[in-house]
């Protein structure tokens, strides 16, 4: 059977940089700059088509940055190149990220007509004070309107990104954000604890004592509230930070969590493939270099031990767990043979179970995955 892969396209444009964000992005998005960027991505897709001809594409993901800032015909044009150069599965998932303030019906319809069947909305919170603190350029009502716009355009699959652990955030505000947006009937929620990144304005405020990050107990309490909040709306957890209606899990992210093959295009985009042993790729971080010279990709060969550990690390994020048969096919030994101490220790302590062909963490330690992984750091 021909192997499947995913394509990720990084769109590095933003109206302004969010105060917590350390991703590569540009606040300048003049038409001329965007035109050159789109041409470079088309060139990169064309260059990679031959080596990726061995794969069928199961997912295409436009992330950012803010893909909804691109000209209306940009995503359709890039999808046209992908369809021309690559073999897509008939039910290929095509996702575009959007910010509520730059997502309108005309754009949504152009995406839907081009084959986009999933939209991921960066909402993060619904309280004006928290949105301002995060540097988010939209309102709660714009977020709710964006959900309706996607549906009106015929895009039924909508994900919401939400953040907890924001300085000054209360539990009541966290529950309000979840409830406010879940009432629109979305099928998927991604919820992550705020990560304080060096070099960001938010980091500077915390370092200067102007803001304080919530303690770990509050973070854990926020996480524990998600599942009981989303279950009445039909969503269940399938990954540590992701909740979905059955059958609506994000196929693109499942490629990541199963340590699968994906092509990354655009500045700072990274990828992984098994074309010449397991290897990671990363494009230049420099927007200027990318626009002037095109993709300059670095390739790193991944040692087998590291590839094994990453497969466990990513797979145990999933409620389903690590596919034992897939692990043995990939590495030529079973998970228990690869980790003869860690696997029995996890089972004996009640941290993990083996069932239906999977090794999975138990719900009570899921949030503490990093502690469990310490057992797998060494193969003994």
Image (spheres, helix red, strand yellow):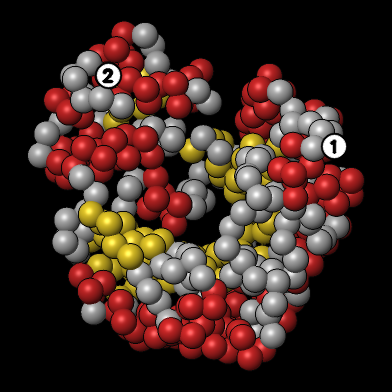
Q: Give the image location of residue 20, x and y in percent.
A: 70, 49
Q: Of circles 2 and 1, which is in front?
A: 1
Figure quadrant of residue 214: top right
- SS at mark 1 in the image: loop
Q: Quadrant of the C terminus?
A: top left
Element under label 2?
A: helix
The residue at the point 69 percent across, 56 percent down is: 122
In the rendered image, residue 183, in percent from the top left (x then y), is placed at: 77, 46
- 103 or 233, which lies in front? 103
Residue 186 can be seen, yes or no: no
Give the residue drawn at x 44%, y 57%.
252
Question: Which residue has dot 2 on it?
Answer: 342
What residue is at 75 percent from the left and 50 percent from the top?
A: 201
Can you say whether 245 is above or below 357 in the image? Answer: below
Q: Is residue 63 found left or right of 143 in the rendered image?
A: left
Position in image of residue 364 (x %, y %): 51, 18
Kindly give the residue lying farthest to the left in the view shown: 332
Counting other residues with Cα less than 10 Å from the Cα at mark 1, is it few (<14), some (14-19), or many (20 or more)? few
Q: Position of residue 211 (x, y in %)?
A: 82, 36
Mark 2 crowdedness (10 Å alpha carbons): few <14, some 14-19, many ≥20: many
Q: Residue furthest right?
A: 129
Which residue does the image show at 30% across and 40% down from the upper left?
A: 311
Left or right: 215, with 372 as reference point: right
Disc 1: which residue = 210
Q: How many marks?
A: 2
Side of 377 relative to 251 (left or right): left
| Quarter containing the N terminus | bottom left
Give the spatial CA distance, label 2 vs label 1.
43 Å
First in residue order: circle 2 vs circle 1: 1
Which sits in the foreground, 15 or 51?
15
């Amino acid at each position: 059977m021909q192997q499947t892969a995913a394509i990720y396209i990084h769109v590095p444009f933003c109206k302004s940089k969010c105060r917590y964000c350390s991703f590569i992005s540009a606040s300048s998005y003049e038409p001329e700059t965007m035109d050159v960027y789109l041409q470079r991505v088309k060139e990169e897709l064309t260059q990679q088509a031959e080596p990726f001809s061995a794969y069928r594409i199961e997912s295409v993901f436009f992330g950012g940055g803010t893909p909804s800032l691109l000209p209306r015909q940009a995503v359709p044009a890039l999808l046209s190149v992908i369809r021309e150069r690559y073999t897509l599965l008939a039910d290929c998932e095509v996702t575009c990220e959007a910010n509520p303030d730059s997502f309108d019906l005309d754009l949504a319809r152009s995406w839907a007509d081009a084959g986009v069947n999933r939209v991921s909305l960066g909402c993060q919170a619904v309280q004006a004070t928290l949105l301002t603190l995060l540097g988010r350029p939209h309102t709660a009502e714009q977020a709710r309107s964006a959900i309706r716009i996607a549906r009106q355009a015929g895009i039924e699959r909508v994900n919401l990104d939400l953040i907890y652990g924001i300085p000054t955030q209360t539990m009541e505000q966290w529950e309000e954000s979840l409830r406010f947006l879940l009432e629109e009937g979305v099928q998927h929620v991604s919820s992550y604890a705020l990560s304080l990144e060096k070099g960001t304005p938010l980091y500077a405020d915390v370092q200067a004592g102007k803001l304080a990050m919530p303690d770990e107990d509050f973070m854990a309490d926020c996480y524990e509230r998600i599942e009981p909040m989303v279950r009445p709306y039909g969503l269940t957890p399938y990954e540590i930070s992701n909740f979905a209606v059955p059958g609506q899990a994000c196929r693109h992210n499942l490629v990541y969590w199963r340590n699968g093959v994906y092509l990354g295009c655009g500045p700072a985009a990274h990828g992984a493939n098994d074309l010449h042993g397991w290897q990671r790729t990363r494009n230049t971080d420099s927007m200027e270099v990318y626009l002037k010279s095109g993709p300059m990709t670095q390739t790193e060969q991944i040692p087998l031990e590291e590839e094994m550990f990453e497969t466990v690390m990513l797979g145990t994020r999933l409620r389903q767990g690590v596919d034992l048969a897939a692990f043995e096919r990939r590495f030529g030994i079973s998970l228990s043979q690869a980790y003869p101490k860690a696997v029995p220790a996890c089972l004996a302590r009640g941290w993990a179970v083996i069932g239906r062909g999977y090794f999975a963490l138990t719900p009570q330690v899921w949030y503490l995955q990093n502690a469990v992984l310490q057992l797998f750091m060494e193969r003994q």
